[in-house]
Amino acid sequence: MRHPLELVFIRGVVEEIEPITSRMRRIRIASGQLRDVHWSPGQHVRLTVTPPTRWLRDPRDARRSYSVWHLDREHGNLDLCVLDHGEGPGAQWAKTAYVGRPVTMSRPEGRLTLREAPYHLFAGDETAAVAFGAMLRALPADAAVHGVLETDAPDGEVPLPRPHRLPWIHRGDDDADAETENARPAAAERTPLVEAVRALRLPRRPGIAYLAGHASDCQAVQRHLLHERGWSRRDIVVKPFWAPGKRGLE
């Protein structure tokens, strides 16, 4: 008989660790429970990153959310791609992860998933690239896809699946740091990401837009689509992952 906690939490171990960019590593988690888990590309899991002794001190530090890069139900493993940033609990967990380390996480959840649409528009930074990569991999090869992603430099570009690889732009030294106060300032209306989306040649009628990453960038791109391209809010899925000085945006 299954333990009641197994209906909510998945227990596993770290099976592989591999760098995929200069600041991001793929962490594979193995668990027999994953063989009967439902996952929609774009969803995330909530990973326990601090020991129970710290939970009472600050419950907000107990868990961090990470998008699922890939789920292999047949072999019972799941890949997370974790950005190396800051000194918060999530960053410390990722930096000290090792093969064989026990892991506790939630089952996949979240509304950042693919919708039916004449075409798909993706816009965000490297924190969005993991969810976007999973979503792009799930689209048919002949799906109409547009979009742009932002990172600090070429070595920060997350490898995306063919045939739907999106172009990258580079913001320079400004840091996409979700767990410290020293993050890049809130985006204005004419940030590089907004300008890159504004320059896209999109069909006249709306498709579905998926906006994720820095909260202010998401809001600015949403305003562009609403006010300059005439889209409606129901055409736009917004998932702010981080903002300067904020924790736990989901």
Image (tube, rainbow, N blue to C red):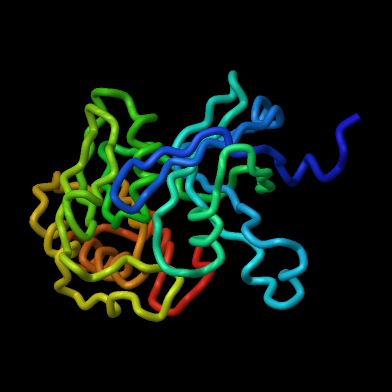
Looking at the image, residue 51 sits to the left or right of residue 227; the answer is right
Q: Residue 65: x and y, percent?
A: 54, 56
**Displayed quadrant of residue 134:** top left
Looking at the rendering, in which quadrant would you find the N terminus? top right
- Of 202 and 191, nearer the camera is 191
- 68, above or below 156, in the image: above
Residue drawn at (61%, 52%), measured in percent from left and top?
47
Residue 12's spot in the image, x, y percent?
A: 68, 38
Labels in figure, total: 0
- Residue 159 position (above or below residue 226): above
The correct choice, above or below, for 237 with respect to 53 in the image is above
Image coordinates of residue 187 in percent, x first then y, are 25, 75
| Residue that extends furthest to the top in the rendered view of this protein | 74
Tell me if 125 is positioned left or right of 11 in this view.
left
Residue that appears at 26% across and 58% down: 231
Front-most of residues 88 and 212: 88
Q: Which residue: 25% across, 51% down?
A: 156
Q: Residue at x 35, y 79 (%)?
A: 182
Residue nearest the viewer, comparing 197 with 227: 197
Measured as percent of width and height from the top left, residue 208 is found at 32, 47
